[in-house]
Amino acid sequence: MPSFLFSFALVLLASVGSREQLLVGALARRLKGVGMLLSAGALAAILSAAFMAWAGAAMAALLPAAAKPMLVAFALGAAALELAWPARPPSPAEPTRSAGAIFLVLLARQLGDAPRFLVFALAAATGVPWLAGLGGALGGVAALALALGMAELGPRLAGLRMGRMVLAAAMFAAALYIGLLARGIIN
């Protein structure tokens, strides 16, 4: 159960002010109805979290027990780098009204973002990938709903950069600590 709660909370926290939220907010301001946008985004969040949970568990199963903490450290490091990268996606000039296109764009963005790397790390670390995936999926859907609810704030969401940098520093510190523990450098 902790993997579900941690996954939900970390995905929701890491998604605030992300490229995905900025894109969803920009699309929500341009499109009339947000039901299709929320449906496409929710499906993308569910599939990306499920894939990353499966990938984390599959990679952890291939590695010896001593190497699993290093896998988790690398995943946390990747999440930290993605969080630290500036989130300034261009606003779509002519947004499509196609749910399929919106779904594909959001899915592609989510497969390499920090929240899904955190789902990967939790699935690899805990050995309960379905709980990490479920928490990540619900956290991702909640983050999209939050972006739709705050769409009128628009570019002011980019002001959350300092919070993303603090979270990036925490993820990097966790990655460093786990990596040093795995290598036996600290006890």
Image (tube, rainbow, N blue to C red):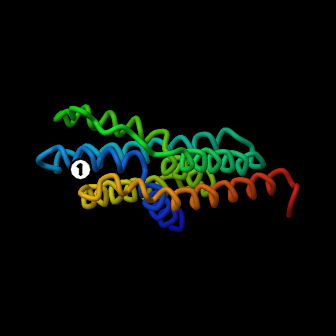
Residue at 34 percent across and 40 percent down: it is: 106
Residue at 66 percent across and 38 percent down: it is: 62
Q: Could you tell whether 172 is left or right of 19 in the image?
A: right
Query: Total of numbered circles in the picture?
Result: 1
Q: Secondary structure at mark 1?
A: helix
Residue 22 is situated, as x and y percent measured from the top left of the image, at: 35, 48
Does residue 30 sit above or below 1 in this rendering? above
The crowd level at tag 1 (other Cα within 10 Å; few <14, some 14-19, many 20+) is: many
Does residue 27 sit above or below 14 in this rendering? above
Residue 77 is situated, as x and y percent measured from the top left of the image, at: 65, 48
Q: Which residue is mark 1?
A: 38
Quadrant where the image shows the C terminus: bottom right
Extreme residue toward the right, this view: 185
Instruction: Determine the image quadrant of residue 165.
Output: bottom right
Residue 154 is situated, as x and y percent measured from the top left of the image, at: 30, 53
Residue 13 is situated, as x and y percent measured from the top left of the image, at: 46, 61
Instruction: Determine the image quadrant of residue 109.
Output: top left
Considering depth in this image, is 186 or 87 the residue closer to the camera? Answer: 87
Considering depth in this image, is 86 or 105 the residue closer to the camera? Answer: 86
Residue at 33 percent across and 34 percent down: it is: 105
Q: Amino acid at mark 1?
A: Leu
Residue at 54 percent across and 50 percent down: it is: 83
Q: Could you tell whether 182 is left or right of 119 in the image?
A: right
